[in-house]
Image (cartoon, helix red, strand yellow):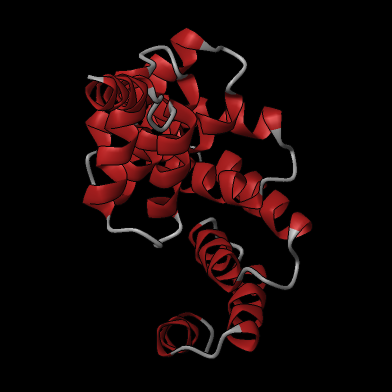
Amino acid sequence: MKKLLILVLSFVLFACKPGPSATYYVTEGNKGLSHKMPYREALAAYNKAIELNPDFAVAYDGRGQLEIKMHNYFGALRDFQKALSIDHKLTGLYYFMGYAKEQVGDHEGSQVAYTKAIERNPQDAQAYTDRAFVRQILKDQKGALQDFDQAIIIKPDSLPDVYMARGLLKIKMNDKNGGCLDLHHSFKLQPDSIIRHYIDVNCR
């Protein structure tokens, strides 16, 4: 009888032992963002975190970023909206929201989100760059040029693609000399056949 009681108590104690927390599962899911875990496993981890704590804003944010990597942009947007509805101070997701909106063709919404990302972090060269491309789509060439300028000010020697994009935009805006200077600088930073092609076509 004594042995049976010990076995029953052991079973009860084991059953009552708490499992991994929602925070643990978010940490596991984050491994998918850094390519340390397959996406589907990371997604399952985020799902488990949300199952354990349906009001865990960070879990929705992380799952949204993972869904971008999985090309589920509408799912990502739903998660970002949910995260913000829980914690409106979670502003770090605005860049990713802008990217997801861009991918689904909501260019005006994308521009708004990138702008909010820049307001949060005025040194975010990538947000300026991506907003510039969106502004080009929206026919705002002047705004796009200003954004490319700002991105280059922030990272003057590490954005060959931005120099190329700005150079092509300047040429489109009838500033051939400025455009060719940018294309040559882009090629200097990153010798590339595509950049070479643009130089050959535009800068003779």
Residue 78 is drawn in which quadrant?
top left
Q: Is residue 167 visible?
A: yes
The residue nearer to you, when weighing 78 against 13, is 13
Left or right: where does residue 113 sit relative to residue 9?
right
Does 1 sit above or below residue 145?
A: above
Q: Nearer the viewer, residue 188 or 172?
A: 188
Residue lying at the far top of the rendered structure: 85
Residue 57 percent across, percent down from the top left: 47, 20
Residue 70 visible: no
Name the spot of residue 86 as percent of width and height, x first.
48, 9
Please state the total of marks drawn on the protein image: 0
Q: In terms of image quadrants, where is residue 36?
A: bottom left
Q: Is residue 169 above or below residue 72?
A: below
| Residue for point 25% across, 39% down | 44
Indicate the quadrant where residue 152 lies: bottom right
Q: Could you tell whether 51 is left or right of 199 in the image?
A: left
Residue at 46%, 58% in the rendered image = 34
Residue in front for this viewpoint, 15 or 102 = 15
